[in-house]
Image (spheres, rainbow, N blue to C red):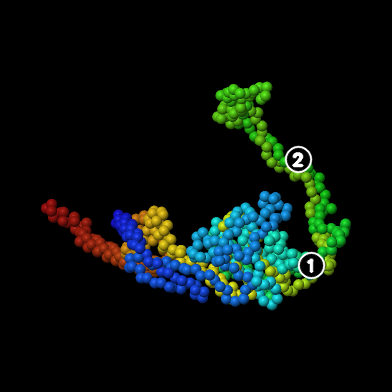
């Protein structure tokens, strides 16, 4: 274990030394590679230099070029001229609003973004906060909805984030009353499109005004909310590309950064629907007085039981309760605080007679209770409550009444809602609580390829510049560690230490203790997987069977040996008995008779 810790400390020291050497190498000068962008390729290498062996790879530098449309357009604006030429600032006032905030006096200016990576790339910036802003510009020609699609596209960057406000555009309807100098919130528009946010409600509007062919009135139709999460587009402070595509077959697509976030059909996916229903409920129809909508009714034949006591209380006192010993009946639960003193500024005429505040009686702390003892309340077993008859199915039930349907007198069917009111100008009419909203690279056209080329030469170039300026993952980690040096320890522990431990524990070749060694001690055995358990169980079963067979053989051998010993012992006992009998017979044969003994005795006496 001491060896492992020593190796860990050594590894940490080597990591710190390596980091310091890397920092010294980073101090060397970096060479810059200049990359110039053209319209088709975006970023093109124009200058190369060979960095020194000790210097890290340099970041590419992107040079900006003003985008140029590659086809027919109805409106295009990149603001690179640095002026508001062609744009009209509104001088209108909002109706029904205080004069202090009714004016459209919010400031607009053409300038570069605060953290622009493309010098020379300018845009329209909403500078003021908590003010009304309105600015508009004429199209080169009115857009008429016929057999060609409509593509609306522009860029937005919330440089300071966004608290509450919008960045949507309005395509202003072609009317004889249109006056861009008086552009305001009530100015008729054909389409409203773009991002909008207030609080935590993130929206991406697509609204068009549809004309009722019967009444001539206009009604706003809102596209369904996108399923995508839009929050990032409002909070990341990056430039995002918003695109609306409307097709003559009534289909539409809403894209952010060339990715579809919403799509549908003008006939099926707008609220309210373009076409009203064929039938409506008769406003003059009334429900009959005898119409029964009750699915259940009380059983009219039910009778309250005679023993049903509605007056029985829900709770009764517990007759089995006994007052605890030591209960202090004469002591109140609360007493006046003896340490309290009347305030010096207490005025009895104004404040009344002063009384000390009440505190818990200290004598009650050691007793089970104080004051008058009362039996606790328990549920009344005889309580039934107010009797009600049971509910049964209503035999007269007629269902929920609905008024009858009649043909809709306002019904119409517009199968081509794409053919909207022509528009002749584009405008921004906004209120925002956040300043420095950046707009750039507006385009309105009928060819999707033209819009894509325009996006590649504008927004695509911004994206490339941002990507070139952003360091890689390693660079970001190094930059973070420069600000917070303690991160070096985290990096080393996160990367080097796990590798070291894997090598140490997996390649050390440590021998696992056998089962026999575990049996000698109380040490817990390691877990094994199912296959190992099955194999070990099988081997164990085979070993047990072999042991049982050996035991059976040993037992049989012992039995045989015992039987043999027993038989030998029986044989030996039998032969011993025969020998004893023969000896007794011999003794009997050699013993003299009484007559012979008497003769022998006589001879001895003589």
From the viewer's perspective, is 360 left or right of 64? right
Residue 545 image-quadrant placement: bottom left
Q: CA distance from mark 2 to mark 1?
A: 72 Å
From the viewer's perspective, is 499 left or right of 323? left
Residue ID at (62%, 66%): 86
Does residue 526 appear in the picture of this structure? no
Q: Residues within 10 Å of mark 1 (few under 14, many from 20)?
A: few
Quadrant in the picture for the N terminus: bottom left
Comes first in the chain, label 2 or label 1: 1
Residue 55 image-quadrant placement: bottom left
Residue 160 position, x and y percent, is 55, 56
Residue 144 position, x and y percent, is 70, 73
Residue on which the image places disc 2: 312
Q: Decide which of 126, 311 is in the foreground and name it.
A: 126
Residue on which the image places disc 1: 216
Q: Which mark is residue 89?
A: none
Provide the secondary structure element on which disc 1 rests: loop
Q: Decide which of 409, 548 is in the foreground and name it.
A: 409
From the viewer's perspective, is 285 left or right of 578? right
The total of numbered circles placed on residues is 2
Residue ID at (19%, 58%): 596
Provide the secondary structure element on which disc 2 rests: loop
Residue 585 position, x and y percent, is 24, 62
Residue ID at (37%, 70%): 49
Residue 192 position, x and y percent, is 67, 65
Q: Decide which of 116, 554 is in the foreground and name it.
A: 116
In this view, which residue lies farthest toward the left? 606
Does residue 317 appear in the picture of this structure? yes
Residue ID at (46%, 68%): 62
Q: Decide which of 61, 584 is in the foreground and name it.
A: 61
Q: Residues within 10 Å of mark 2 (few under 14, many from 20)?
A: some
């Amino acid at each position: 274990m001491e060896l492992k810790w020593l190796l860990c400390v050594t590894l940490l020291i080597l990591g710190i030394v390596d980091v310091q050497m890397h920092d010294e190498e980073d101090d060397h000068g970096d060479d810059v590679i200049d990359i110039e962008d053209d319209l088709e390729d975006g970023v093109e290498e124009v200058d190369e230099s060979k960095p020194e062996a000790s210097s890290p790879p340099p970041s590419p530098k992107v040079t900006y070029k003003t985008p140029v449309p590659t086809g027919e357009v109805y409106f295009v604006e990149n603001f690179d001229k640095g002026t508001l030429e062609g744009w009209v600032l509104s001088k209108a006032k909002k109706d029904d609003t205080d004069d202090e905030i009714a004016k459209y006096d919010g400031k607009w200016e053409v300038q570069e973004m605060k953290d622009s990576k493309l010098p020379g790339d300018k845009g329209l910036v909403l500078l003021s906060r908590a003010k009304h802003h309105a600015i508009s510009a004429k199209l080169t020609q009115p857009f008429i909805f016929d057999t060609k699609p409509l593509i609306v596209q522009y860029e937005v960057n919330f440089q300071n984030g966004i608290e509450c406000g919008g960045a949507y555009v309005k395509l202003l309807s072609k009317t004889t009353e249109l006056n861009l100098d008086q552009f305001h919130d009530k100015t008729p528009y054909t389409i409203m499109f773009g991002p909008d946010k207030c609080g935590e409600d993130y929206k991406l509007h697509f609204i068009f005004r549809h004309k009722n062919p019967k009444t001539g009135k206009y009604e706003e139709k809102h596209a369904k909310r996108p399923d995508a999460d839009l929050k990032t587009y409002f909070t990341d402070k990056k430039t995002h590309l918003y695109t609306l595509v409307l097709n003559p077959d009534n289909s539409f697509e809403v894209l952010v950064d060339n990715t579809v976030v919403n799509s549908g059909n003008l006939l099926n996916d707008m609220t309210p629907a373009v076409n009203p229903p064929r039938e409506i409920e008769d406003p003059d129809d009334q429900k009959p007085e005898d119409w029964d909508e009750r699915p259940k009714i009380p059983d009219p034949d039910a009778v309250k039981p005679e023993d049903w006591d509605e007056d029985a209380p829900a709770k009764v006192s517990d007759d089995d309760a006994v007052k605890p010993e030591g209960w202090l009946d004469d002591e109140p639960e609360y007493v006046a605080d003896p340490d309290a003193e009347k305030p010096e500024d207490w005025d009895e005429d104004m404040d009344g007679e002063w009384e000390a505040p009440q505190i818990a009686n200290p004598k009650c702390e050691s007793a089970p209770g104080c004051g008058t003892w009362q039996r606790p309340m328990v549920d009344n077993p005889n309580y039934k409550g107010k009797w009600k008859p049971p509910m049964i199915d209503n035999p007269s039930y007629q269902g929920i009444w609905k008024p009858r349907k009649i043909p809709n007198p306002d019904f119409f069917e517009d199968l081509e809602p794409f053919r909207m009111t022509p528009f002749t100008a584009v405008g921004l009419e906004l209120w925002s609580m956040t300043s420095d909203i950046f707009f750039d690279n507006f385009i309105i056209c009928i060819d999707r390829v033209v819009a894509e080329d325009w996006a590649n030469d504008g927004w695509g170039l911004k994206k490339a510049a941002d990507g070139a300026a952003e360091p890689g993952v390693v660079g970001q980690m190094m930059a973070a560690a420069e600000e917070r040096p303690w991160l070096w320890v985290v990096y080393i522990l996160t990367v080097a230490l796990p590798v070291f431990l894997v090598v140490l524990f997996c390649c050390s070749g440590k021998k696992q203790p056998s089962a026999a060694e575990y049996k000698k001690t109380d040490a817990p055995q390691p877990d094994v997987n199912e296959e190992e358990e099955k194999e070990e169980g099988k081997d164990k079963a085979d070993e047990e069977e072999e042991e049982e067979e050996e035991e059976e053989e040993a037992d049989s051998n012992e039995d045989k040996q015992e039987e043999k010993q027993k038989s030998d012992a029986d044989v030996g006992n039998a032969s011993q008995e025969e020998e004893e009998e023969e000896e007794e017979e011999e003794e009997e044969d050699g013993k003299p008779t009484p007559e012979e003994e008497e003769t022998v005795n006589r001879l001895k006496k003589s």
